[in-house]
Amino acid sequence: MQFSNYSHQNPSSFLLMGIPGLEASHFWIAFPFCSMYALAVLGNMTVLLVVHSEPALHQPMYLFLCMLSIIDLVLCTSTVPKLLALFWANAAEIAFEACATQMFFIHGFSAIESGILLAMAFDRYLAICQPLRYGSLMPPKAVGKLGAAAIFRGLGLMTPLTCLLAGLSYCSRVVAHSYCEHMAVVKLACRGTKPNNIYGITASTLVVGTDSICIAVSYALILQAVLGLSSKEARAKTFGTCGSHLGVILLFYTPGLFSFYTQRFGQHVPHHIHILLADLYLIVPPMLNPIIYGMKTKQIRDGALRLLKLGTVIKPSSPPWTLSSSLHSP
């Protein structure tokens, strides 16, 4: 679809294509996405409830895990409901303001999650390499400050990225994507996209490059300290604790980098493959993160089982009015 007389103004809405080339399969593709979204919501809400209900878990590692769960809920909720509406009800239209808002949440909270993963790596470094000073170096206030720094950096960097959209002149309003990804929207502009391209790739590379290098350095120091431990049991326990975090890091960065750079440079990658992977990037990590931490972290696993048992115990076996009537029966 082409615009007429839109050379100097924004369109009132865009049309999302979904997964180009797989339109006939949209209805069936939506079912696994819906299932993964339900698991992501259930898993992350469970983590939040477990940490909230267990005072012993009010420690930096688990507070960061709660932040990660909240971010994951925001990321998948900002995309999956609209994606399901598109796939099941063909609700392709999205208002310009809603598109910009969705883009802000996707890219902004992705940057925040990168910052939280860096903070978690720093926390593990202090806990393993500086155990005697850990309590003084990582008090609860420090957790809040690191979380706030990640939020301000992520949203601060991505706010100009979203605002730059308003200055573009659009020649089409058909977005060849399932959601309002930055480059997919910028490609609809007639001209003047160089600032968007430069700022987008600079901000993303700065965030991912800085964070990934710092995380790599942290884990190199952790590995050095762990290999110096004399006890095999202590080494295994430490590797188990860090293994879940490394799994989450790889799950976040690997598909994210692939999606980001193929959107700009991967013309040889089939378009439907790229879009499908970009969709999975925003739903698979939020679904798997609670599972990874639940399997690797005994405290989370035990807390979830206690919540499940508590729910089973307090669930009445019969309606309240039945119990009341039986008490007053002769």
Image (cartoon, rainbow, N blue to C red):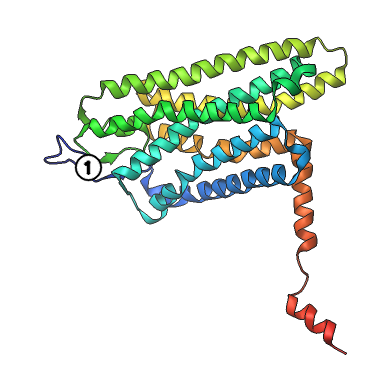
Vertical position of residue 6 compared to residue 328: above or below: above
Look at the image and tell me in which quarter the C terminus lies: bottom right
Q: Residue at x 65, y 20 (%)?
A: 122
Which of 64 and 26 lies nearest the eye of the viewer?
64
Tell me the element at label 1: loop
Give the residue displayed 27% in from the left and 30% down from the top.
187
Q: Residue at x 77, y 44 (%)?
A: 303
Q: Position of residue 162 (x, y in %)?
A: 34, 32
Q: Quadrant of residue 163?
A: top left
Residue topped by disc 1 = 11
Vertical position of residue 145 compared to residue 308: above or below = above
- Give how far across and how far down residue 140 sits, in percent: 68, 30
Pick the residue in front: 86 or 306: 306
Q: Is residue 10 visible?
A: yes
Image position, residue 26 (x, y; %): 41, 48
Q: Quadrant of residue 16?
A: top left
* 5 to the left or right of 209: left
Q: Is residue 251 visible?
A: no
- Looking at the image, which residue is at 60% across and 36% down? 67
Q: Label 1 amino acid?
A: Pro
